Image (tube, helix red, strand yellow):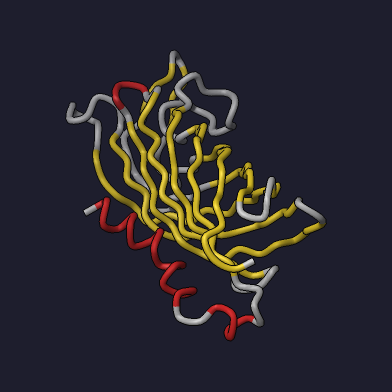
Amino acid sequence: MLKSIGLLILLLPAALIAQNPRSASGGEASLWAGGEVSYFNTGYPCAGNWLWNCKYNQVGVGAFTDFNLTRKFGAEGEARWLHWNGLGGMVESNYVLGPRYRVYGKGPVSFWVKTLFGGGWITTPNYPEVGSLKGSFFMYAPGGSVEYRLTHQIALRAEYEYQIWPSFQAPTTYSGSRAAEHNGPLTPNGVSVGVAWRFLGQ
């Protein structure tokens, strides 16, 4: 089920561009896809959600598709799997899709902002012990990225993303002597670096 949702999100921008991108946008449309590695404070094991203050920050991999309708407006689909370095076997995954906008572009450098919407999946530490959980939640994620084109078809990308899981509820956890309360939104956030390849367009 999760694989099917992720595949749908990643392929949706491709379906949008497949019909006739040149006539739709004056030849400016393009389709990029790539992979990345991520480093995230998942917002759960530690009392604070600042990226650098938790020794249980998780490492993962992701895949993304960017459909740029014009040189400024586009859509992004993203899937991420944070499966390493989690406390007690904790894992998080998310599958999201949403608009993005280029706020600056000069030469090979572009800065983009985005807000993505979708689902977050979590397995908390030591599941299925009492007080742990495994489930899925609605989430949205504002973020920004910088892209540098190495060639006409290859680009490097670095991004920061701040996720908000508004309906998340879970038992209190402890990191040393500090309690991490979970009676409100879960707010994972992190950075990713990756490589994108242009399949269609400019």
Identify the residue shown where x is 44% and y is 67%: 14
Residue 117, x across and y down, in percent:
46, 60
Q: Is residue 19 above or below residue 104?
A: below
Foreground pick, 174 / 127: 127
Q: Residue at x 43, y 54 (%)?
A: 139
Q: Residue furthest top?
A: 176
Q: Position of residue 191 (x, y in %)?
A: 58, 37
Q: Is residue 94 left or right of residue 69?
A: left
Q: Who's the residue at 46% across and 59% down the image?
A: 77
Front-lying residue, 90 or 111 = 111
Q: Position of residue 184 (x, y in %)?
A: 43, 45
Asked whether, in this view, residue 162 is left or right of residue 84, the answer is right
The image quarter in which residue 202 lies: bottom right
Question: In the orientation shown, which residue stands out farthest toward the front?
Answer: 152
The quarter holding residue 135 reads: top left
Question: Which quadrant would the N terminus be assigned to in this image?
Answer: bottom left
Question: Does residue 55 appear left or right of residue 25 in this picture?
Answer: left
Image x and y of residue 142, in percent: 58, 54
Tell me if residue 125 comes above or below residue 140 in the rendering: above
Residue drawn at x 44%, y 14% as measured from the top left: 176
